Structure formats: C-alpha cells, structure tokens
Amino acid sequence: MKTVLLDTSAFIRFLAGDEKVLSALGRADRVAMSVFVLGELLARFRAGAKEKRNREILDGFLDKPGVEVVNATRETAEYFALIKTALKKAGRPIPINDVWIASHALETGSLLVTYDAHFSAVPGLRLWDEIG
C-alpha cells in the first residue's frame, strides 16, 4: 500500500485505538488527510467535551513525517464534477463533503480508509477491505 487517505470515520476510530485503522496506517508510505476531513473533525471536536485534547492529538498526527493535508485545487473540482454527476445518474447520492473526500482520494491515487459504506457507490474509488 502506498498512500492512504483517512476519512472522518476512520480518524475517529483511530482516536479510539482501532487496530484495523492503526494497521492500515502502519502499512502506508504516505498518509493524506483531505482538508474537508480536517474541517469535519474540527467541527466535531468543537462540539465535544474533549476539544483541546483531540486537537492536540490531531496536530501531533498531522506533524508526523509522511502525513499531509490535501487542499482543494482545480483538479479536485474536476473530480468532484465527475463523481457528483456519476452518482446522480446512478441515483446513488452521498453527502456532499464525502464527494469532496472521494475527489481527493481519486486525485491523489489514495486508498480511502473509511467505515462509511456509501463510498462504494463512487466509480473508480479504491476502498480498504474493512469498509462497513
């Protein structure tokens, strides 16, 4: 496995010590986190009781060698348009942030680590074996 992109559900499980997520991270050469996942996490932390601690863990994670935040680009927008159109034609919409996250996974050629089964509707997306 070369590059993995963590979805919000996988990072939340990582915080809880999920062995499957830890194993996927251990096998990766590079770990990507979509800026959209980062936004979802920060919003979730802000609404919770452990915001400071969760932010510290997140910051430590993002500071590790081989971990990078993927920002949106024009290429990301092109993938977004392809995915959103394909899902609409198939009658299988997914949450809009997840379209952006899938776009980043395709753009970076990453394996998406997630527990959200609706990502399986995205054509061409590589998903890890543990998907819900």
Image (tube, helix red, strand yellow):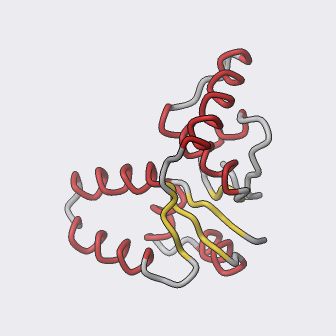
Reply above or below: 126 against 89.
Answer: below
Residue 118 placement (x, y as % from top left):
64, 36
Give the residue furthest to the front: 74
79 vs 9, nearest the viewer:
79
- For image coordinates 57% across by 30% down, the residue present is 94
Q: Is residue 98 left or right of residue 82?
A: left
Residue 74 placement (x, y as % from top left):
55, 41
- For image coordinates 73% across by 56% down, the residue present is 109
Q: Is residue 16 left or right of residue 92?
A: left
Reply above or below: 8 against 31.
Answer: above
36 vs 22, nearest the viewer:
36
Q: Is residue 96 left or right of residue 79?
A: left
For the N terminus, the quadrant is bottom right
Q: How many marks?
A: 0
15 vs 112, nearest the viewer:
112
Residue 127 placement (x, y as % from top left):
73, 52
Residue 87 placement (x, y as % from top left):
68, 24
